[in-house]
Image (tube, rainbow, N blue to C red):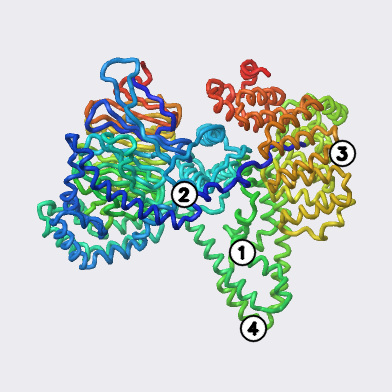
Amino acid sequence: MPVFKTPFNGYSVKFSPFYEHRLAVATSQNFGILGNGRLHILDLSPTPSPTPISELTFFDTADGIYDVAWSESHDNLLVAAVADGSLKLYDLSLPPQQNPSRSLPEHTREVHSVDWNPTRRDSFISGSWDDTIKLWTVDRPTSVRTFKEHAYCVYSVAWNPRHADVFASASGDCTVRVWDVREPGSTMIIPGHEHEILSCDWNKYDECLLATGSVDKTVRVWDVRSYRTPIAVLAGHGYAVRKVKCSPHHRNMVMSCSYDMTVCMWDFMVEDALIGKYDQHTEFAVGIDMSVLVEGLLASTGWDEMVYVWQHGTDPRAT
Amino acid sequence: MAMRDLVTGGASCNDSGSSSSSNPLGSLANALIGSSSKTRDRLKEIPTSTSSGSSNQFYSNSDEQLTALPGSESEYQFNQHSAGQDVGFLHNYRSASHSGFTEAWDDIQPERESNFLESRHIYNEGFATQTQQSWDGPPQKILSGFLHSFVDSSRFGAPFRPTALPMLGLTKGEKQCIRNRSSIMARHFFADKSEEYINAQVDALLCSLDIDNDIQLKGPLPGRVRELEEYWNESQGLRAPVADGWVAEYRQNKPELFNPNGWANLFEQEHGPNGWASEFEHDQAQAVSLNQSNQHMSRLAGMEQTRILAHTLAQNNDPKFKNSRFLQFVSKMSRGELFVEGNQVKESSISASGDWGAEYRQHHDGGLSWADHAREKELLGDDKWVDEFSKLNVQDWVGEFEHQAEGAVGEDIMDSWASAYDEYLNEQSVAKHNSDSSKGVYVFSDMNPYVGHPDPLKEGQELFRKGLLSESVLALEAEVLKNPDNAEGWRLLGIAHAENDDDQQAIASMMRAQEVDPTNLEVLLALGVSHTNELEQSTALKYLYQWLRNHSKYGTLSPEELPDSLYYADVARIFNEAAQISPEDADVHIVLGVLYNLSREYDKAIDSFKTAIKLKPHDYSLWNKLGATQANSVQSAEAIDAYQQALDLKPNYVRAWANMGISYANQGMYEESIRYYVRALAMNPKADNAWQYLRISLSCASRNDMLEACDSRNIDVLQKEFPL
């Protein structure tokens, strides 16, 4: 299965929504604590080849890159969340010296998460350690709106897959908030975990289901219509859960990665929820994604500077 | 008694980073004007430059998107260039905003406008310029290896120890960056650990990188703060009338965009606008995390109350009041240097730089029974007084005092307070002494063959002379087990440990020696040096000062009473006087050398040690000190010569072997450094610091294959792989 080594520590990996063979990897030097960042654009070889992953291009930044999101409207456009508080837009169709095509320095602290609106496709949101969320469109040099209610770092933001104006945010203040951009404030607060919540993602089949991952080592699945108790608590990680991702192909499947260095697959509707555990990483596993275009194709990256792409059920390290 | 891990790092690091942004306002202005005009240009350029692509609609139809985007709070003028239909939209939007929503929004977010300005300020010294600063070469390798061991420490459960690092030349912005990010991230890595443990880990990291932890930009978790609720309830209240109006008006303009039964609104209807909020409030009341902020709040409240009291007291002109130790106590409390927690008065950790070490070690020992005993004893003594103090409603107390002061009958009460406070101070000093030593609990070896030896002291001295350090440690342990009051036994044991590169045990032994013989000069000097090695400045100063006080020749130089807090400059001044009195006393020059290491005046320190070496050329520990100082001042090549001299005089000098390794590592010669560490560890596998250095060097030399041998402390494998 394809493996790629990055010079810096991996932070995030995302499949392109347009090309099944393309992915973007956000990396940061020194675990993102200090140093430069690099955004890799990688291509998978369609046929067996000695180099199953080749690097299409890369972009350097003066600070670490914590997250990346592909545009849902344009195949060459992507946005990076940079630790210096800026968002940077990259256009692969432009010559390298014209990239980043735009830098949006508004957050006053590290930007930890970015998500492109999959239904409207013209806008994206960013979550930052300055406790705010900002709404952006590609055509404006400043943010459209700032959402400031969280009392601590916002670690993750995710658009609802059905409702174009609804998104969720996960924060270190131990809450998940659901927002409607037409409303002035959040429409719901879910005090989801006793510890910091590092990640959230919406179910792609049921727009009322939301998955969260927390420092308390659990993944929880919530129904926002009755959010007082989670509909599932998935225990099995040994350390904080860094990211959760809902499957684009199976309603009940959730993927997660953790500081315990493993990547887990879950079926939250069955009793033995843990259906797969991958331990290819030798450092914290912090970035995961599931391909929308190829069913069962998974990708992960971690602080061991490795990017793995593999088919669910196979060994990521097998060559 | 040796000196190695003297503080290194960027105290003297030049502010080259800040010079590049010497006019932050100017560059800010440039950045603002420059960037906005640039983006405007790009707005025009981009559509044409990407027009070859098939799906390049995302820029060109921007006008439509702008209008289609609801929820915009922005009133920026930049979109004036857009087509006419926009103007209509904006006009409508603005008239809608007159209904009050904008004002309401601004009320909620007063700092919204300033965000953009501030953003240029984050870590500006490190990152203000767009030019790529490159992080390469030895400093990057050292930093990377070091941070790696920090991250690793979350997994192996081993506490992260402060480590001396060569100067990395970090700028202020970079230091701030490391401090902020590592403290946020550490809370994720150390999920199971207590807040204190996490803080100790981060402190150890920051201390090693010579980063002050005094300004916590992003403090600990705020918990679920009450203000948030209020704010939320307020905004909730504001929102109902205002926002609905706005939404309604907007809907008229763009009806087709809206699902009239807004999805999110549904929830609200279901649960009522405030139903969930009160529910949430209830939940919050039970939230565990609240405790912490409460504690902090009550501490602040206490400070405020004592400040009132201090103010009242200070207005009295009676000189007795001015000298009142009680007043000092109260004003100390009002400044936050002391605080009441539960029923104990504690010294705030911000007051003394060395305190983190004590805290950390108590933790490290798992709160070893020793420390607990000490505290229990202390409780029996002063608990009552403190208890009374904290039980008193301070506010009432202030009132009562004011009342009595007016009547001028307060003196008796004042006296009894003062005596109670004296009592407290005495107890406190005893307690402090106890807790100082609790961090240096001596750990005896199991299976000591010398127990039962007829004269273990003599045997230990003999072994020490032969340079068999680990053996002599065992013999001396047998001696102090037999005669716990033998100061010489403890002292020699301490020296053996120091030369064996084990500062923890060295400090523990020396403290026992000092308990038995409080005025032993060699012991005091050794304690000063060991604490310097462990980066504990205030404690080191205390012992060096006591050395002077107890010295027959120089005792008269220092003031009668030991001041509460020692200032480095005062101590250094007195020692310089001592050096003038007797320039031929090598010991004075040694202490001066140590002091200059504390203040990081390495050139002066090198001179002092060189002077001492001229007086005592055969003192191997002096050569080692000289080497360590040279290494700290980035003269690693010279340092290696000095260490070589020390090793020529004493081939089994474990510490000098380890120091050689450090000097090579500082020069980026990791392979060599590994060989020296391994040599040192082969002689004393208990040298914990050396194991850590070895780990860093192994990862810097990309010898990850040997990390396992290092972690399992398999010295045989390492020796085979890295012969010297």
Q: Earlier in the sequence, mark 1 or mark 3?
A: 1
| Residue that mark 3 sits on | B615
Asked if A316 appears above or below B422 in the picture, the reply is above
Residue at 80% over, 60% down: B561
Residue B310 appears at what percent x and percent y?
62, 71
Tell me the amino acid under the disc marked 3. Leu
Q: CA distance from mark 3 to mark 4?
A: 66 Å
Q: Position of residue B419 (x, y in %)?
A: 73, 68
Q: Which residue is the extreme one toward the bottom? A: B407
Judge whether residue B62 can be spotted in this image: yes
In whole angstroms, how far apart are the C-alphas of marks 1 and 3?
49 Å
Q: Amino acid at mark 2?
A: Tyr
Q: Which mark is residue B406?
A: 4
Residue B617, position in %: x, y? Answer: 85, 34
Is residue B400 shown above or below A221? below
Residue A31, which numbered label? none
Q: Chain of mark 1?
A: B
